[in-house]
Amino acid sequence: MAFLSMRHDFRAPAFAPESLPEIYATALEQFAWADGHGFDSLVLSEHHGVDDGWLPAPLTMAAAVLARTANARLMISAAILPLHDPIRVAEQIAVLDNAFPGRMWVVFGAGYRVEEFDMAGLEHAARGRILEEHVGVVLEALSGESFEWRGREVRVTPKPVTDPRRMLFVGGGVPAAARRAARLRLAMFPMNSDASVRDAYFEEARKIGFDRGFVLQPVGPTFVHVADDPERAWAEIGKYVLYEAQTYASFQTPGQHSTPGIHATSVDDLKASPQYVVGTPEDVLARLREVPAQGGIVFNPLAGGLPAALAWSSLELFAAKVLPGLRPLASG
């Protein structure tokens, strides 16, 4: 069946009932819960300077999540590599892979919010070029061998346990990003399911003779909430989920969009979107069974600062009445 994923962005808008430290604690508990219930991946992302505290340091948080879990893969989707020193990023990845071998995927993205590049003192227009250079540097650094970069000799130790090309992806949502991923000879995890992005990747791969590439396109719902009374649930969670959708949509730049993104003006817009699955256990099970085997089912239980009690109620109902119908042999 489709992959089960849990995502946390660690956001606490001003109207949220819980503080950021409380949200951090709950999110870590929920990641551990997901791991214990057979989820396939645990997802972190990166943004900077957001009023609600959106996680700015996913590699730091990755260590905490990996230490609290045992089986699920930790995915950073995405790390905004142009904002960082690629040598330091390579060192962090190498350390994490030695501490938790083979349990991490990192998607490198170019970023898109102008404010983040201003904050870092970088040119927003150059982000694609910087990404391509920095990914190349990370790959060379993770070889464990000495090399020269910008006039200085560099060597990153320890060497990772995992082949970097099996844990690093390139993200993006336009054909130019897809061609960049192919040139770097890495798999691509795009931010949308546009056919033009997939086609551009494989066209570039054929041109350069890269025959081991693949594109992992997002298919499936990006918010799931289970409740015995769905209308009451929407009344309780609506303002948090709408805030999440509207702020995320506001980040998008012209000509770029992502699958989780929806331009919603009301909760009714969310209800009409296939990205949001809110319903009784029976209804949710029926919807999730429709997700293709190569797709993903994403839980974002604290979206927009959604109260922990409501999130836990949904998760426990999912475990009791939905999960057995999806994965009869799942433990938990």
Image (cartoon, grey):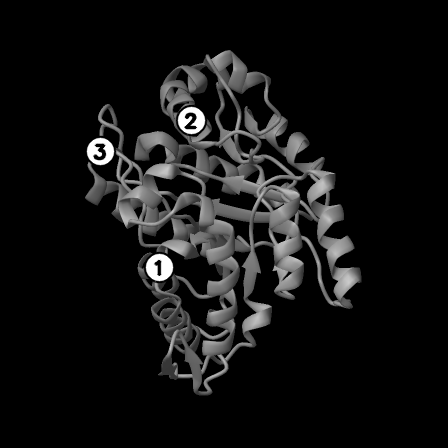
The disc at residue 18 is: 3
Secondary structure at numbered mark 1: loop
Neighbourhood count class around disc 2 (C-alpha, 10 Å): few under 14, some 14–19, many 20 upward? few
Q: Position of residue 284 (x, y in %)?
A: 60, 30
Q: Which residue appears at 31% of the width and 54% of the height?
A: 57
Q: Residue 84: which disc? A: 1
Q: Which residue is pictured at 55% across the width and 67% down the height? A: 167
Q: Amino acid at mark 2?
A: Ser
Q: Residue at x 37, y 75 (%)?
A: 95
Residue 321 lies left or right of residue 46; in this view the side is right
Q: Is residue 233 left or right of residue 115?
A: right
Q: Position of residue 93 (x, y in %)?
A: 41, 70
The residue under label 2 is 250
Front disc: 3 or 1: 1
Q: Dot 3: few (<14), some (14–19), or many (≥20) neighbours within 10 Å?
A: some
- Relative height, residue 295 to residue 137 (above, below): above
In three-dimensional space, the C-alpha distance between marks 2 and 3, rounded to whole angstroms, equals 24 Å
The one nearer the camera, 34 or 79, is 79
Mark closest to the chain's N terminus, 2 or 3: 3
Compared to residue 156, the image places residue 136 above or below, namely above
- Under circle 2, the secondary element is helix
* Quadrant position of residue 159: bottom left
Between label 2 and label 3, give the one nearer the viewer.
2
Quote the CA–CA distance across marks 3 and 1: 31 Å
Percent across and percent down for residue 287 are: 66, 30
Q: What residue is at 52 percent from the left and 69 percent from the top?
A: 136
